[in-house]
Image (spheres, helix red, strand yellow):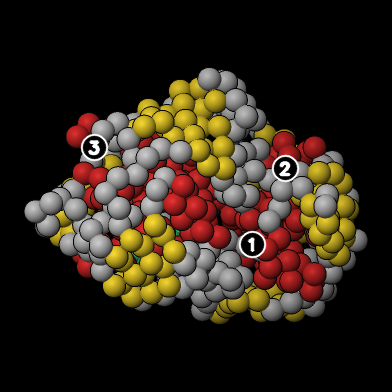
Amino acid sequence: MGHANPGGSGDTGGMSSVVVEPSGPLVGTVEVGGAKNSVLKLMAACLLAEGRHTLRNVPQITDVDIMAEMLEALGATVTREPGDVVVIDTPAADQLIAEAPYELVEKMRASIVVLGPLLARCGRAKVSMPGGDDFGSRPIDFHLLGLEAMGATFSTSHGFVEGEVGDSSGRLVGAHIVLDFPSHTTTDNLVMAAVLAKGTTVIDNAAREPEVQDLAALLNAMGANVCGAGTSRIEIDGVEELSATSHAVITDRVVAATYLTAVAMTGGELVLPDARVEHMDMFLRKLAAIGVELDHGPQGLRATASGALRAVDVATLPYPGFATDYKPFLVTALCVADGVSIVTENLFSGRFRYVDELRRMGADIRTEGHHVVVRGIERFSGAPVKAADIRAGAALVLAGLVADGPTVVGDAEHIDRGYADLPGTLAALGARIWRQ
Ligand code: EPU
């Protein structure tokens, strides 16, 4: 990706550990920035129209850099400009290279979202099959079934899935798709495929995440007809052509939740001027239940905490339920809450790996299938630990804030995939934290 403004707060210089010492109370204001799980799809959506697309409020995270590399491998030009702006120049369809390379898909599973736009625009696409990851097997069967219903045929060989549109016009055709599960990225992929299809597509049991609504808002601004995003039935009337536009990414609710949990644990006062409280209702209810005082006014969302927390039970569910991405933070807070909590994971079978690391820091957690039982302790015990993924890494940093002695979180480059500068932001709130 070209940089009109090299350097920036997201420049991590390849550091791989974060050191955290007991800290608190944390006090201050944090600008949360744009949502990773929205911007990655918005960038892929820019493949759907020739021209110069402008995305604003784009976070300086490495997943955005990986998606930029992907778009460049497909034939687009991506430039980062000052003020969190990314400009994407997309060529004519016959100049796109409809092949997503292994090296990039392997780095970031979300790359699969280029499949729908490439099929819609080029009539064919070859994408490396994403592998599993640290929270279990993550298949792409829903993506392929939905696209097949719209007239694509797929074959797999040598680690790639290759799709082709059967219709002689080279366009996908509208279909009625019922998802087995309201999968977030499948919904994004199918909506992007449907906007240029012939006729009407209806997606039932669609994901209702705010990031799906953000994608629909961008597509509609490009000239698409997407109705019902944010509900479980999305209807898309296909159009022949879209045009480039400018769009601001919605605020990242998971990053907001990270800073809110930090203050819940250390005590203090935090203001998030750009938080979208309507997107994180279930999380805020649980935060209030464990003892955080919340107030939403013209200044944004204000959280005040004493650091004394109460136990609560939680089960993850698709939006508007309690997001699986919030769970590592809440589990970490519950480790130092008063009482016993039961936390149930309903989305990703293996999303408990950070639990072993929290145990190394003295947490009293028992895993039973997809449940964990957490008995509150007084404080964590600082230790060297490893980040298995973005949210697990952030959770271990939070644990370090209320540990005895220093905690060294290794493999911290995982954290930079989803946070512009987690250590720097926490340090600005008063935490004793630095990269090593
Ligand atoms: N699933 C299938 N087949 C498919 C697709 C999904 O069986 O073809 C299953 C998954 O295995 C899982 C469930 O459906 O059990 C839900 O997965 P979903 O497709 O909704 O997840 P995703 O779209 O791949 C997004 C976020 C994740 C977030 C989940 C759940 C992006 C790029 N990723 O993943 O975010 O945890 O939704 O809300 O949008 C993160 O930010 O760190 C992250 C992992």
Mark 1: which secondary structure?
Answer: helix
Residue where numbered disc 2 is placed: 31
Based on the displayed image, in which of its 4 quarters is residue 175 positioned? bottom left
Between tags 2 and 3, which lies in front? 3
Mark 3, residues whose alpha carbon is within 10 Å: few (<14), some, or many (≥20)?
A: some
Residue at 51% over, 79% down: 369
State left or right for residue 190 relative to residue 254: left
The percent coordinates of residue 155 (x first, y second) are 14, 57
- The residue located at (29%, 31%) in the rendering is 91
- Which mark is on residue 45? none
Residue type indicated by callout 2: Glu
Q: Which residue is mark 1?
A: 279
The residue identified by callout 3 is 93
Quarter of the image where the C terminus is located: top right
How far across and down, in percent of the image, does residue 327 sit? 62, 65
As shown in the figure, which amino acid type bears the numbered disc 1? Answer: His
- Counting residues from the start of the chain, the first of labels 2 and 3 encountered is 2
